[in-house]
Image (cartoon, rainbow, N blue to C red):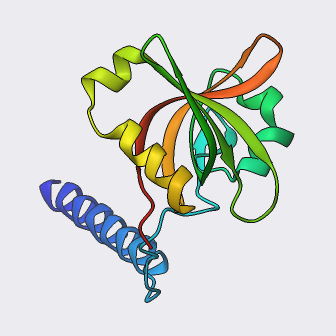
Amino acid sequence: MNFKILGLFILVIIVAVGAYTLGSSSGTSNSVQPTTPPVENDVVQNKSVTKSFFEVHEITTEYQELLGKTISTRGIVQSLNEGKGNVFFELKDPQNDSTIKGVLFAKTNSDNAGRKDVLLQSRDTGAIIYLKGEIDVYKGELEIKAWKVQDFEF
């Protein structure tokens, strides 16, 4: 009787190992991973697909579904103004003329020195920057409330 249980146990192990081996070998790939932030990085969340990286023109056309969501984007700072410690800027899509307004609030700016400098450098040199923030509408206009701002590295 113990030999039947032992035989069944061994059969289950063989099937499990075979299933694992087949599953892991079908998922391997020899492709090289990109070193820049992915433009089409899809993440499955709650059975819906949401991109984590958006070009500016995609934000401005898909903003209704993006309101309140944290996204990443890149662009060139076109203008920059300051008021009460806040930094207001306009970010231009490097591929076309689409723009979005952005704000770096005083608290975020003071807690993380150097973010305003990256924005100023982009405005002055035309360098592309990478930023992360929340999509919102303020006084009827679309904006991104930025909290991560850095040089865009290729």
The x and y percentages for residue 49 are 68, 44
User: Observer-nearest residue: 85 or 75?
Assistant: 85
- Give the quarter of the figure containing the N terminus: bottom left
User: Observer-nearest residue: 81 or 9?
Assistant: 81
Establish if 35 lies above or below 81: below
* Visible residue check, residue 7: yes
The x and y percentages for residue 152 are 45, 61
User: Observer-nearest residue: 142 or 36?
Assistant: 142
- Give the quarter of the figure containing the C terminus: bottom left
The image quarter containing residue 139 is: top right
Find the residue positioned furthest to the left.
2
The x and y percentages for residue 104 are 48, 26
Give the residue displayed 78% in from the left and 48% down from the top: 58
* Visible residue check, residue 129: no
Give the residue displayed 43% in from the left and 77% down from the top: 33
Q: How many labels does the image show?
A: 0
The x and y percentages for residue 136 are 68, 21
Q: In this view, does 86 lie to the left or right of 141?
A: left
The image quarter containing residue 67 is: top right
User: Observer-nearest residue: 62 or 147?
Assistant: 147
Find the residue positioned furthest to the bottom.
30
Give the residue displayed 70% in from the left and 50% down from the top: 92
Establish if 30 lies above or below 11: below
